[in-house]
Image (cartoon, rainbow, N blue to C red):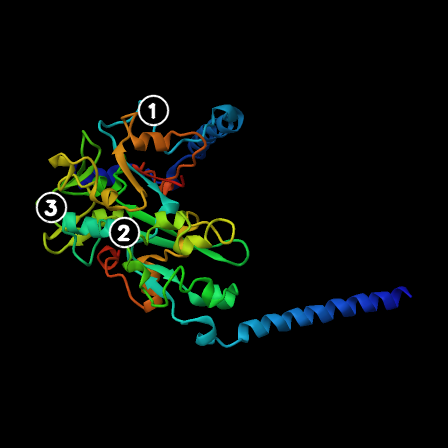
Amino acid sequence: MRIDDLQQLKSESPETLPSAERRKFLKMGLVVTGVYLSGTVLSLTSVRDAHAEDVVPEVGKYPYGPHYSMVIREKLCIDCERCKEACVKTNSVPVYGFRTTILEKRRAIANGEHETIFMPVLCNQCNRPPCVRVCPTTATWKDKKTGIVMMNSARCIGCKTCMTACPYNARYFKEETRAVDKCDFCWESRLSKGEKTTACAEACPADVRVFGDLADTKSRVFELLHSPETMIWVLRPEAGALPNVYYVNV
Amino acid sequence: MKKSLMVIVLGVLMLSGGWLLAADEKKAAEPYDEDTYGPEAPIVWDKPVKSVVFDHKVHTQGQGLECDSCHDELFSQEAGAAQEKKDFTMKTLYDGGYCGSCHDGETAFASNKRCTSCHIGVRGQARLTGGKDKAEEGHAKD
């Protein structure tokens, strides 16, 4: 189409629209809005169906096998940091980073006293990992068999987008490899070589970190997460990443 | 009659309040005497696990224990000597040894409860001595 022809055409700007045409359009808009609005008001979701979504997947509905997960018995942690030392040694973690660490919070308790709570943190090996979603080079991915969020340092271009995307601050840039490094549940250093547990879990003197296969109904992680009257929580559930590191106080 | 009773009651309340307040202040202001209460600096054990604290002040000045409540039967009077012994473990505490002699759930809170009261952790110890954690640096999101 040539520019001369275009100039001949009638303008379709709002000023030239007949008001009947405008009314028709507005009416249509109102009808659509009305249908949606009344639908929401009238349908009134049944309260009986509004079950609170559990952080632990339903039994038999684990997406991976083995479905590796860790249960952290939080109140027993004393921040002796043997787990950190074991991790550093096993996975050659430099001093400026961590694959796992201990966070600390203080809380007022009765009688004007305070208590300290130590919270071990590590990669949550999320079922919907935001880090994997943002990686431009597929250097990090969710392993289809074990569910571990893996890292191929050779493919990493060091853009650090995954570090920003991670809701758990579980990634750091490792100068030595010029790549982002993270916890892989000791897959490379131990599990792939036949070991049954992670270095941190093995080193813990207080039995805080329990590692295992959630899909195995006889495993300790399964038992801890499915014992009666147990409160289970995950970190930042609102991120919707569906973590595989669970916290309990038993 | 009623009025004077009221005045008396109020007076007693105010007086006792003032007295309690003064007692509180006196307690807080009382200087710490190392000869009476033991060394002021907390003892930090690092064996068998790191960063476990004992504060003389809390136990003597705070709770009114005498030196011979613990010395020399439970602990010798030498900082850090206990941790060189093989039986300086939680198991021994649960059986009534060392701290477990009082921390049995009756005299004081049980040894298997409120772990972080004494286990101040590597972080707690760093704060006590003014240290800093380097590992956080690599994770900084800027």
Tell which circle, 3 or 1, labels the residue nearer the N-terminal end. 1
Q: Position of residue A214 (x, y in %)?
A: 28, 30
Left or right for A48, reference A197: right
Tell which circle, 1 or 2, labels the residue nearer the N-terminal end. 1
Question: Which of the chains bears the disc numbered 1?
Answer: A
Q: Position of residue B92 (x, y in %)?
A: 36, 49
In 3D space, how far apart are the residues under numbered discs 2 and 3 (Cα atoms)?
A: 22 Å
Instruction: Give SS at disc 2.
Output: strand
Q: Residue at x 32, y 54 (%)?
A: B88
Task: Report if residue B58 is visible in the image.
Answer: no
Q: Badge 1: few (under 14), some or many (20 or more) residues near its Cα, within 10 Å?
A: few
Q: Do the residues marked 1 and 2 share a common chain?
A: yes
Residue linked to disc 3: A153
In 3D space, how far apart are the residues under numbered discs 3 and 1 (Cα atoms)?
A: 35 Å
Q: Residue at x 20, y 49 (%)?
A: A86
Mark 3–mark 1 CB contact (< 8 Å): no
Residue A52: name its quadrant. Answer: top left
**Label placed on residue A59:** 1
